[in-house]
Image: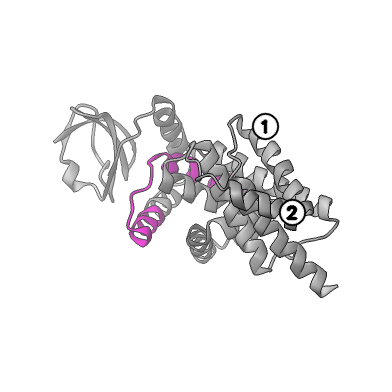
Amino acid sequence: MVTVKKVLNNNVVIAAHKEYEEVVLIGKGIGFGKKAGEPIAKESAEKFFVLRNAEEQEQYKTLLEFVDEDFISFMNDSLERIEEQFQSSLNEHIHVGLTDHLHFAMKRIQQGHGIKNPFLKETELAYPKEYRAATELAERIHKQFDVRIPEGEIGFITLHIHSALTNRDLSEINRHTQLVSELVGLIETNLEMEIERDDMNYLRLVRHLHHAIERVATETYAESQDTLLNVLQKEYPLCYTLSWKLMKVMQKRLQKRVPDAEAVYLTLHIQRIYTTKQRMN
């Protein structure tokens, strides 16, 4: 049993818990007729979660005061579906972050405002499973609320889902996605070419860049490849030099050392794209 602290609406209750202090209970009619101080069985809730961060607790309480109950219920159901789909728990911050984000996004869409997402393709390629889940959520929103979520917005939903699945801060994921886009732009500028976004080599490059950035950020360094480095420097000097430029940008943005071994993998990815383009010309 837990004790009611505040009834936010008929379906959502903030309750006092011995271990977690404050918990959120969600269930059809769970708050109806309840008053502060009354005991309530947490088993009666369809959803039970903890917002350990005090700021998120306040944000969620505020959110529930101006967001329609039907949408709150829809989001809780949708997040539960995503957990089942991935067979993994979502970090509870998504109840605040994604619900708030989508609520305002839908308002903007209904008012005719466009949504731009310059990192859409990189997001889709880096997180394909999360992108599919985000697309399914967008389709459900259209079906239930008659609001068509544009593709750019699906990219932002994808990042929220990935953040909640990996327990990584959304702002960090955004920074890394922007860095990948910057690195791709640097490659195109230096090689004086436009990389086809549907090319399999581009897919491999983007995924490698994401993994490389995460390795550097977490200081999970690859093994030394000095012998291969020397070979690549002689065989592919243009792409080899470019790989070091990319590494310097990564090091500056991440404020962490990028191991020399990354030059091997970057050179090979860049050379594959450059060779393919030359054959086409």
Q: Main secondary structure of the magenta part?
A: helix
**Of the pair 222 and 206, the residue shown nearer to us:** 222
Residue for point 62% across, 56% down: 206
**Of the pair 123 and 102, the residue shown nearer to us:** 123
**Image quadrant for the C terminus?**
bottom right
Residue 32 in sight: yes
State which quadrant residue 203 falls in.
bottom right
Q: Position of residue 192 (x, y in %)?
A: 86, 56
Magenta region = 77-106
Left/right of residue 193 with respect to residue 58 in the rendered view? right
Residue for point 37% across, 47% down: 90
Q: Position of residue 25 (x, y in %)?
A: 28, 41
Residue for point 13% across, 36% down: 1
Q: Disc 2 marks which residue?
A: 234
The single residue placed furthest to the bottom in the displayed view is 280
Element type at marker 2?
Answer: helix
From the viewer's perspective, is residue 52 above or below residue 77?
Answer: above
Q: Residues within 10 Å of mark 1 (few under 14, many from 20)?
A: few
Q: Identify which amino acid the numbered label 2 is placed on.
A: Lys
Residue for point 17% across, 33% down: 2
Q: Position of residue 5 (x, y in %)?
A: 27, 28
Q: Disc 1 marks which residue?
A: 252
Q: Residues within 10 Å of mark 2 (few under 14, many from 20)?
A: few
Magenta highlight on residue 89: yes
Q: Identify which amino acid the numbered label 1 is placed on.
A: Lys
Element type at marker 1?
Answer: helix
Left/right of residue 16 with respect to residue 233 in the rendered view? left
